[in-house]
Amino acid sequence: MMHKFAVFGNPIHHSLSPDIQNQFAKQTGFEISYDKILTPVDEFVSSVKAFINQGANGFNITVPFKLDAFKFANELTLNAKIAGSVNTIKIEANKIIGENSDGIGLIKDLTHNIGIKLKSKVILILGAGGATQGILFPILKQNPNQVIISNRTHSKAIRLAKNFSKFGNTCSISLNKIKHESIDIIINATSASLDGRMPNIAFNVANNTVCYDLMYGYQTPFMSWAKTNRAKMISDGLGMLVEQAAIAFEFWTGAKPDTKKVLSNLRR
Ligand code: NDP
């Protein structure tokens, strides 16, 4: 039986999701179709409704529609509810179930692929957009010592730190007031890398710090900055992309794909 999937976004041409999902399907013996659907910014609902009417089993959602997908779903997983955004939808009879696999994808990449423990660590997250909303709860579930949120628009960082404080020790600091000494892990969750830019930070990373950029596909200015400062470890977000895709695939099909194989194919 053919399973029908797609990813909705704008822009979408750069998306690696069809390649990743097709590799998962091949591994697990599922027959799937997976399309990239370029969606006009004000046509998310009509586009996904048309896709569902064609017999879709599920779909992914990327920038800028994760909030629209959150509103569109008629059932939400706990992750999606807490994140307030949805990147994966499963269609089951009359149910449109929204999930957010970004945060668990990041945790899997950091802990399984890269081998870093988050427990008792001080973690700095740069950015307070949709991606930060998606990763905060899974990160806090790992029991870090503290999660510091810093954002260009400081009020957003204050709001997220407050909203998520019930799940762990969170605080917000202005970008220009960060002190590096006590930070174990810096996660660049801004979209600055999309434009080849660096968040405006005024500190040098310590050489025992891990630097992770959610962006993938090229060595970002943040990664170059980390390299110049001799960070202990530097990673892009390709592993997160593959891991969140695997969670979506399992959510749809029940089958667990081998992410390491796919990741090494993509890194070749
Ligand atoms: P949003 O548009 O929701 O948020 C963007 C954030 O980046 C805001 O906090 C914004 O600050 C900040 N920002 C943008 N430009 C700059 C800049 N020049 N300097 C400093 N801060 C800046 O985007 P998302 O949160 O959805 O996505 C963030 C990034 O994460 C994207 O690059 C996306 O591709 C990536 N991502 C990767 C995934 C993966 O699987 N690897 C999964 C999900 C996301 P302000 O509030 O001031 O506007």
Image: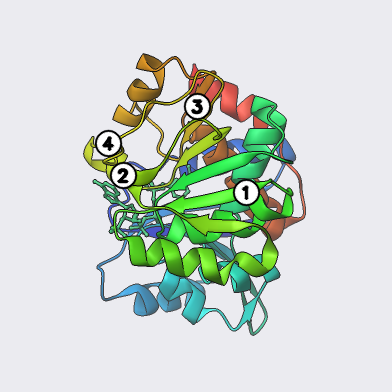
Task: Give me the C-alpha separation between circle 4 and circle 1.
Answer: 24 Å
Measured from the top left, where is residue 197 in percent x and y? Answer: 23, 37
The residue positioned 48% from the left and 40% from the top of the image is 187
Q: How would you rate the neighbour count of disc 1 (Cα within 10 Å): few for under 14, some for 14-19, many for 20 or more?
A: some
Depth check: 224 or 217 in front? 224
Residue depth check, mark 2 versus mark 3: number of the one nearer the observer: 2
> Does any atom of ligand 1 lie closer than 8 Å to the CB of label 4?
yes
**Mark 4 is on which residue type?**
Met
Q: Can residue 27 be seen at all in this image of the molecule?
A: yes
**CB-based contact (under 8 Å), mark 1 and mark 3:** no
Residue under label 1, please give it: 146
Residue under label 4, please give it: 198
Task: Give me the C-alpha separation between circle 2 and circle 4.
Answer: 13 Å
Residue depth check, mark 4 versus mark 1: number of the one nearer the observer: 1
Residue under label 3, please give it: 235
Q: Earlier in the sequence, mark 1 or mark 3?
A: 1
Depth check: 26 or 153 in front? 153
Q: How would you rate the neighbour count of disc 2 (Cα within 10 Å): few for under 14, some for 14-19, many for 20 or more?
A: few
**Mark 2 is on which residue type?**
Asn
Depth check: 169 or 116 in front? 169
**CB-based contact (under 8 Å), mark 2 and mark 1:** no
Residue 82 occupies which quadrant of the picture? bottom right
